[in-house]
């Protein structure tokens, strides 16, 4: 999921807005953490 989000940023937008890989990781990290937390909670609740 995260790779699918990072790929368009690296291919098209990165040169235009001077986005480095570290900045992209900073942008994606909260999104990834939130999705992981929601997934773990939903698995925990379902059992």
Image: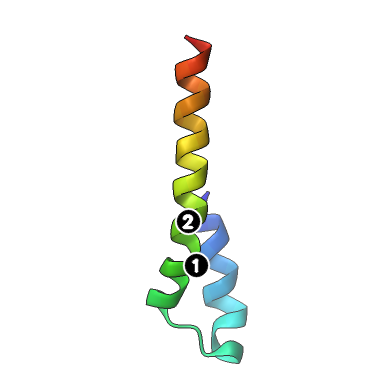
How are the residues colored? Answer: rainbow
- The relative height of residue 39 versus residue 33 in the rendered view (above or below) is above
Q: Residue furthest top?
A: 47
Task: Give the residue number, with chain letter if any, for mark 2.
Answer: 30
Q: Which of 35 and 18 is in front in this view?
A: 35
Q: Which mark is residue 39?
A: none
Residue at horizontal 61 percent and vertical 90 percent from the top: 16
Near mark 2 (Cα within 10 A), the count class, few <14, some 14-19 or many ≥20, is few
The image quarter containing residue 9 is: bottom right
- The relative height of residue 47 versus residue 37 in the rendered view (above or below) is above
Q: Could you tell me how far apart the alpha carbons at marks 1 and 2 are, in whole angstroms?
A: 7 Å
Q: Nearer the viewer, residue 1 or 26?
A: 26
Q: Residue furthest left?
A: 22
Total labels drawn: 2
Task: Give the residue number, with chain letter if any, for mark 1.
Answer: 27
Asked if disc 1 and disc 2 are in contact, CB closer than 8 Å, the reply is: yes
Answer left or right for 10 relative to 25.
right
The image quarter containing residue 21 is: bottom left
Residue at horizontal 56 percent and vertical 76 percent from the top: 11
Residue at horizontal 50 percent and vertical 83 percent from the top: 19
Q: Is mark 1 on a helix, strand or loop?
A: helix
Residue at horizontal 47 percent and vertical 50 percent from the top: 32
Q: Is mark 2 on a helix, strand or loop?
A: helix
- The relative height of residue 18 versus residue 29 in the rendered view (above or below) is below
Residue 34 picture location, percent across and down = 50, 45
- The relative height of residue 39 versus residue 29 in the rendered view (above or below) is above
């Amino acid at each position: 999921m995260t790779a699918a989000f990072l790929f368009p940023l690296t291919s098209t937008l990165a040169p235009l807005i001077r986005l480095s890989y570290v900045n992209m990781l900073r942008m994606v990290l909260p999104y990834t953490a939130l999705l992981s937390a929601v997934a773990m909670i939903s698995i925990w609740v379902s059992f």
